[in-house]
Amino acid sequence: MNRIFHCLPGVLASLLCACATTSPQGPRPAADAPELVASKVDAGGRMRGIVINRRYGDFFMIDGKEVHREIELAWDYERGTAIRRTYDLSGALLTTEDLPGAEMRLTPLEDERVKDLVRGYPTLEGVASEPGVVIWAGGFVMRIPGDRYCDKGTRCIYATLSTDGGFTPIVRAIVDLQRDRVVYPDFDPGTRSKTATPSMGSK
């Protein structure tokens, strides 16, 4: 059977290259960083396994015929990478591909976990509990080559504590959902060379 690698149009194509590759050893999560301070939250809420982000139908040309497939995008927390799984219409899994460097928007559970980690962090909990303070999570995923906490195998998320209905930022923090830790409790983007990768579906 001929294998046709289907390329998604527009912005998605740049984020999810269909020519997905895997190193001989495969993706792996970033190493533990025991110096990071744990938030005072239930460890049972940590993201684990494969967290499905979105699912949609698409069409592929296989052996000269148009075939309908179901595509599932997810983050694999066991391996620290985005993945794409392809199913036939009966629900049978056909392929699983790693998507090195690809990112995607937060799911509601991930969004809430980011906020919980911020609320439970020693230097942030006081600010987060003040009246009128809201936490905005996501929008961009931060990955900095060579960074101690936000390089390959991480899922570093912006979390902004704001007042005035979210219009006046107070503190910007970075949370790595892969490690389940606040890695930068007071992040100043002006002092650091950063690469922010737009997440799928961000606005």
Image (spheres, helix red, strand yellow):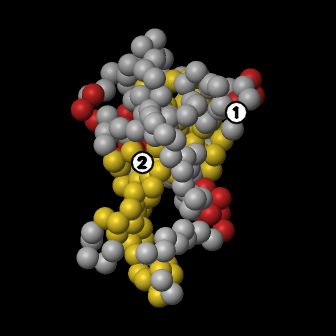
The residue that appears at 70% across and 33% down in the rendered structure is 194
Q: SS for tag 2?
A: strand
For the image shown, how many numbered marks are present on the structure?
A: 2
CB contact under 8 Å: marks 1 and 2: no
Quarter holding residue 18: bottom right
Res 18 visible: yes
Left or right position of 15 against 130: right
Q: Dot 2, how many residues are within 10 Å of its Cα: few (below 14), some (14-19), or many (20+)? A: many
Q: Secondary structure at mark 1?
A: loop
Dot 1 surroundings within 10 Å: few (below 14), some, or many (20 or more)? some
Q: Nearer the viewer, residue 186 or 17?
A: 17
Classify residue 82 as left or right of residue 76: right
Q: CA distance from mark 1 to mark 2?
A: 22 Å
Q: Position of residue 9 (x, y in %)?
A: 63, 71
Quarter holding residue 184 = top right
Residue that carries the numbered disc 2 in the rendered image: 75
Mark 1 or mark 2: which is in front? 2
- Which quadrant: the N terminus? bottom left
Point out the tag, 1 or 2, that comes first from the N-terminus: 2
Disc number for residue 92: none
Camera-nearest residue between 6 and 120: 6
Instruction: Give residue 194's mark.
Output: 1
183 on left or right of 93: right
How far across and down, in percent of the image, does residue 137 sit? 50, 42
Which amino acid does the dot numbered 1 rest on?
A: Lys
Coordinates of residue 84 in the picture (x, y in percent): 44, 58
